[in-house]
Amino acid sequence: MFMRPSERFWTGCAVSWLLVVGLCLSVVSPSAAFVADPEKDLATLDRLEIFQPGEPSVLYAIRDEPFASLAPEFRIFVPLSRVPKLLQQAVLDIEDTEFYEHGAVSLKGMARAALRNLTAAKVKEGGSTITQQLAKSLFLSPERTFSRKVKEIQLAGEIERRYRKDKILEMYLNTIYFGGGAYGIEAAARTYFSKSVGQLNLPEAALLAGLIKAPSLYSPFADIKRAKARRDIVLTRMKTLRHITAAQANAALAAPVTLKPFFKGRGTALYFVDYLRKELELRYGRAVLARGGLQIYTTLDLEMQRAAVEVLQSGVKGIEKALAGRRKGSQRDPAGLEGALVALEPATGEIRAMVGGLDYAKSQFNRAVQARRQPGSAFKPFVYAAAFERGFTPATIVDDFPISYSIPKNGRYVEWSPENNDRKFRGPVTLREALEESINVPTVRLLEAVGVDPVAQLAHRMGIRSELRPEYGLALGVSEVNALELTSAFTVFGNRGVGLPATGIRRVTGPNGEVLETAQRPGDRILSEEVAFQMTSLLQGAVERGTAKGGRVPGWQVAAKTGTTQDAADLWFVGYTPKLAAGLWVGYDQPRAIGSHETAGRLAAPVWANFMRRALRGMTNETPAIPEGILPVRVNYRTGLPTDPSDPGGITEYFVRGALPEREAPLPGAPTAPPESAPPPLPPASRLPAPPASAWPAPRAGPQPPPTAQRFPSSPVAPPVPRLSRPPLAPPPSVVRPPLVPPAPIPNGASAR
């Protein structure tokens, strides 16, 4: 119903005076108020954890800058004797001038508040004393209601009966919130000025006192001009009450607000803080982290972390905008794309940046470590590394022709036919071309030759902790992993075959400086230096001319691999230099298609490259030396055979000494023998060998080659090509595989384009 101004005025008067009467009644006779006995709330007040000695554990970044506390609240208890008198007076003058004269409540203060509430027709100001504020902050909700105000006064009365005024002021100064995550005056002094409370000067003390009324509104982190204006009100009040001289007031009023934040990069590494908290709680316990005063020196680079946050947020928004444009102007998807990004130093395994999502306030789910998603073709490097360990080379030929397998499912056989992303087949290709172009069928054939178990075992040794299902779809990345473990595994390639587990901690010291733990680790040899170098060469080729071209970083030679699962439900880009490895994932929290024609090379690669450009700034670009066991040879890119320097299709290939091609490839345009007079295939050791017949799934389509050819099923009309000679190794031993299960989903269209 509409109320005239005069009606609103008198309604406000009635509300305000009823409030005063009710409050007075509650003071005179607590039984008159409909509130529970305060004894229940106050029984253990003086034993509350916040009033016990001890400091929260603090996290320090790579340059020893503090950036977070592991306590639920950043609070450091300080006795009143260590709080400067001027600071105590500033708080009293602005919050409760007559604190030492009145009891639990101030009738004068309530009357003043009632007058100010008259025109508002609501409880706008409560006239709370310091004791009332203490009761409210410890036990009550912040709502402004009559019943809460009555209970506040009852609790305040009980506090006044139990404790001396100095003790109440001490509890208040250690309880009240000062903004910036700081609870209590000592935490506030450190948060804003990186000082202990005893080191504060008058302008700093006045600024902190002014924050109590509205910490967010007057925060100097948010608006330094407003914070200064509020500080000056406190100083003027102290001068008026003659608690400071005019000279002191004038000097303090003229002083600028000079902040020295204790926590650097505040709020940019919340996912990383949660990650470390869970890890450290297992070793030290929650109570020690909250009050034990540990100094935890982490591996986080704050500048790199800031770059990761900004690049991921802007990059995912850019992807959403691009997708909306391709969907003919449709609005932003309400489900919202998400992302994760991690960066590690290959030489140490130290985590330099971790972002687990676009907005920590909306979702604390850390997608960098908690989300397990199919990596798609980003898993393929493990297949090729296992093959190189067993004597294959980047120039080994493998057939890219249709093939089908019968695999058991629910007591019967079903057909699975791996397909390439473009639905095309290229015929014979080298392993280099197969990986650089992320061709699916040759990779499945390679896994079949090497064995599922050796590939899975190598991936686990390199750092994959998630379960890997024993199936041929493993080659196409159907087993879920998280971003941290996948990126950590790639660091083995960048660290010349030596692996170190990912870590976020350098050392931990106790409150007295004693070293409790360090993270000095020698690392384990996972791959030979030669195999790691070959893999880096192939992954550099993927960036130079393959599916990862979008990940190029000017001035740096990066090695990287894309990963796109079926219908682009997951987009991955993982790559490295000798200085830094980074992994990026983009997708929906509930897996679904981003777009059937979208690829990581198109959408994720530019985001990754933007991060690397910023992260590598200022680092020295070093080209890894070629290992002594590697011999560079000029070969033809298509055939893998040695070629003339004038061959436009020639590249430098890297072979382990003793595993070189046997003959030169013909130059383009040179006459070749007709198919019917072509020489017979070389012995089995000269090309990718087939596993024993007993280990094969039953072929279901396509004619079979002669058994003496020892090659994978391929098109009968394909002309013979020169085959590569491997070192004279025995064929790989057959692997006893567990029963195969079909991929989930069957990755017919899996790709890493």
Image (cartoon, helix red, strand yellow):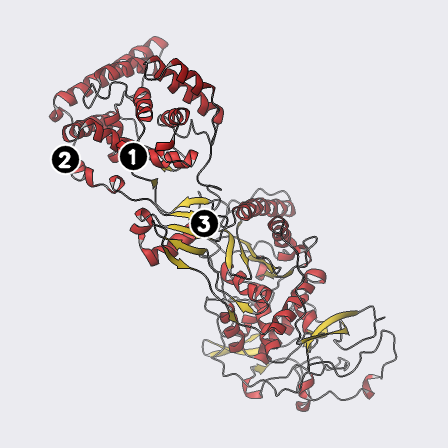
* Element type at mark 1: helix
Q: Which quarter of the image is occupied by the C terminus?
A: bottom right
Say which of 123 and 739 sits in front.
Answer: 123
* Element type at mark 3: helix
Q: Which mark is residue 271?
A: 3
Give amino acid for label 3: Tyr
What is the distance, in whole Å, between disc 1 and disc 3 at their CAs? 28 Å
Going from N to C along the chain, the mark reached first, 2 or 3, is: 2
The residue carrying mark 1 is: 174
Q: Nearer the viewer, mark 1 or mark 3?
A: 1
Which residue shows up at 25% across the image and 23% down it? 129
Going from N to C along the chain, the mark reached first, 2 or 1, is: 2
The residue carrying mark 2 is: 39
Say which of 229 and 662 sits in front.
Answer: 229
Image side of residue 143 versus residue 321, left or right = left
* Element type at mark 2: helix
What is the distance, in whole Å, between disc 2 and disc 1 at their CAs? 22 Å
- The answer to whether 730 is drawn above or below residue 578 in the figure is below
Q: Quick check: can you spot residue 612?
A: yes
> x, y percentage for residue 722?
77, 82
Which residue shows up at 27% across the image and 40% down it? 50
> x, y percentage for residue 381?
60, 68
- The answer to whether 9 is drawn above or below residue 26 in the figure is above
